[in-house]
């Protein structure tokens, strides 16, 4: 039987999807195989047994004699294969990051970007904010493994390692399993905006234009990007006026 794991699914979501299709399997056994060290990934840092972010989302053939651990191993092996195809190790080094950090960044892109053209720009925002030691303030990190019924304001106030409003730098692990496009974006961020880019509008000619902020701009999921906090606030107000934000 074929099982499709969409890009951006967490280990927990993958386990649930698998057991929807393969009823003799258990989501808890899938999660255990992906976290207890029974499956080893060459992409995991030493001492890390959690394979969140290291399982490649795709369509897989699962047979009656498969086990949860065997399926996890197949997803892990495919991510290793994609990493080799994308030259992850060398490309990560050229950016000043480890392959695992790149996969964390790719997971953030996967969860934040709703349209393909935003991926590289969101990647650049992440790199720019990390370089400036600005908190990432990425909403998707707050939602990782959180109570789905929790109010956003409550999540924002909770001191967890995944709260990028409170803590500087990357979260400790990926927050989802990224697909190839998100990995590519993490390895090839957008770079400096052109002078006519939305992020440069209204800036003095002597000011440096760069991607530092973004907010949802329309109901199709496109984001608008900004250099300054003032631009960002103006973009938020436009989105609210358009009914995109509450």
Image: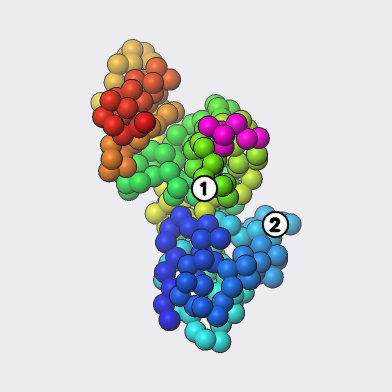
Separation (CA) of disc 2 from disc 1: 27 Å
SS for tag 2?
A: loop
Taking 125 as reference, is 35 left or right? right
Q: Identify the residue at image location x=45%, y=34%.
A: 125
Quarter of the image where the C terminus is located: top left
Taking 194 as reference, is 48 left or right? right
**Observer-nearest residue: 9 or 125?**
9
**Observer-nearest residue: 81 or 222?**
222
Q: Identify the residue at image location x=35%, y=42%.
A: 118
Q: Is residue 194 visible?
A: no
Q: Is residue 156 magenta?
A: yes
Which secondary structure type mostly characterizes the magenta part of the structure?
helix
Disc 2 residue crowd, few under 14, some 14–19, many 20+, Cα 10 Å: some
Residue 23 placement (x, y as % from top left): 51, 78
In this view, 68 is above or below 240: below
The range drawn in magenta is 153-159
Tag nearer the camera, 2 or 1 = 1
Residue receiving disc 2: 48
Q: Which mark is residue 42?
A: none
């Amino acid at each position: 039987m074929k099982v499709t794991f969409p890009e951006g699914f967490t280990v927990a979501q993958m386990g649930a999807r698998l057991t929807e299709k393969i009823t003799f399997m258990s989501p808890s056994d899938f999660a255990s195989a992906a976290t207890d060290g029974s499956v080893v990934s060459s992409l995991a840092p030493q001492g890390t047994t959690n394979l969140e972010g290291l399982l490649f989302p795709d369509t897989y053939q699962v047979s009656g004699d498969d086990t949860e651990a065997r399926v996890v191993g197949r997803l892990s092996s495919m991510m290793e294969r994609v990493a080799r195809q994308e030259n992850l190790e060398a490309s990560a080094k050229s950016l000043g990051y480890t392959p695992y950090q790149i996969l964390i960044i790719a997971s953030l892109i996967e969860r934040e970007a709703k349209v393909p053209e935003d991926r590289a720009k969101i990647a650049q925002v992440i790199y720019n904010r990390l370089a400036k030691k600005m908190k990432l303030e990425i909403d998707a990190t707050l939602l990782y493994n959180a109570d789905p019924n929790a109010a956003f304001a409550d999540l924002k106030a909770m001191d967890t390692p995944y709260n990028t409003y409170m803590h500087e730098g990357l979260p400790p692990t990926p927050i989802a399993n990224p697909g190839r496009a998100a990995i590519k974006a993490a390895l090839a961020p957008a770079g400096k905006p052109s002078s006519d880019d939305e992020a440069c509008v209204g800036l003095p000619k002597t000011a440096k234009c760069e991607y530092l902020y973004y907010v949802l701009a329309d109901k199709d999921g496109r984001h608008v990007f900004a250099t300054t906090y003032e631009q960002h606030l103006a973009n938020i107000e436009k989105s609210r006026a358009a009914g995109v934000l509450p």
